[in-house]
Amino acid sequence: MEETQWDIKKIKHLKRKLLVQFNLIMLLLFLLIGYFAENARPSLIIGGFCVLMWIIVAITLSTLTRKPIGTKTSRTVEEFEKNRLGHKRWKRRKIIETVTISVVSVFITVLMFSTDFTERFDYPLDAFPFIGAWIGANIGEIVRISNL
């Protein structure tokens, strides 16, 4: 296997750029959830989340089976990770990621079709788990970037 030299400073910059993109998407989701929690039925929020999860499953399956989908930045970072971990270990991690996301997507889909959502969301209080996950994902990514 040929060894590729990577500019770690550039990879850190690209990962920070992806982190900013991730935060912008999470902010948009947070605002949309807030709007729909106040103005729409809860089943609409769960249904939108279900569709979003299945899109993520399709993207991870696509990354696993062929060339990654996404921006040039995300494809470069994905190639770096594949090179750094080795193809076999990278593929094992991607399979675990795909299976985990698929199981969660199936669970949310079953929940969506089997539960009657009649009560409304108490938006400010119900947003704390979302905010906690968002903060945790940011801390984890910052630690991974600094460990490069």
Image (tube, grey):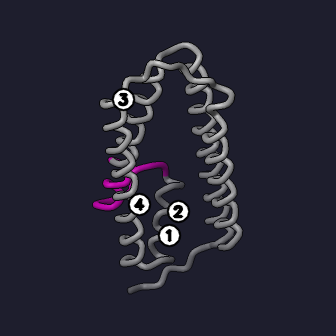
> Farthest residue toward the top?
39
The CA distance from mark 2 to mark 1 is 6 Å
Alpha carbon separation for disc pair 4 and 2: 17 Å
Q: Are marks 1 and 4 in contact (CB under 8 Å)?
A: no
The residue depicted at 63 percent of the width and 51 percent of the height is 19
CA separation, marks 2 and 3?
40 Å
Residue at 36%, 36% in the rendered image: 111
Q: Earlier in the sequence, mark 3 or mark 4?
A: 4
Which residue is denoted by mark 1 in the rendering? 81
What element does badge 4 sit on?
helix
Q: Secondary structure at mark 3?
A: loop
Q: Nearer the viewer, mark 2 or mark 3?
A: 3
Question: Which tag is nearer the camera, tag 3 or tag 4?
Answer: 3
For numbered disc 1, what is the local secondary structure? helix
Q: Which residues are magenta?
A: 58-71
Instruction: Examine the structure image and report whether residue 85 is included in the region drawn in magenta.
Output: no
Q: Is 17 located above or below residue 40 in the figure?
A: below
- Residue under label 4: 97
Q: Could you tell me the amino acid type at mark 3? A: Thr
Mark sitting on residue 77: 2
Whole-percent x, y for residue 125 in the image: 67, 31
Which kind of residue does numbered mark 2 sit on? Answer: Val
Badge 1 or badge 4: first in the primary sequence: 1
Q: Nearer the viewer, residue 126 or 136?
A: 126
Q: Amino acid under label 1? A: Glu
Label whose residue precedes the other's in the sequence (3 or 1): 1
| Looking at the image, residue 93 lies above or below residue 41 | below
Residue 116 location in percent, x, y?
37, 23
Of circles 3 and 1, the one toward us is 3
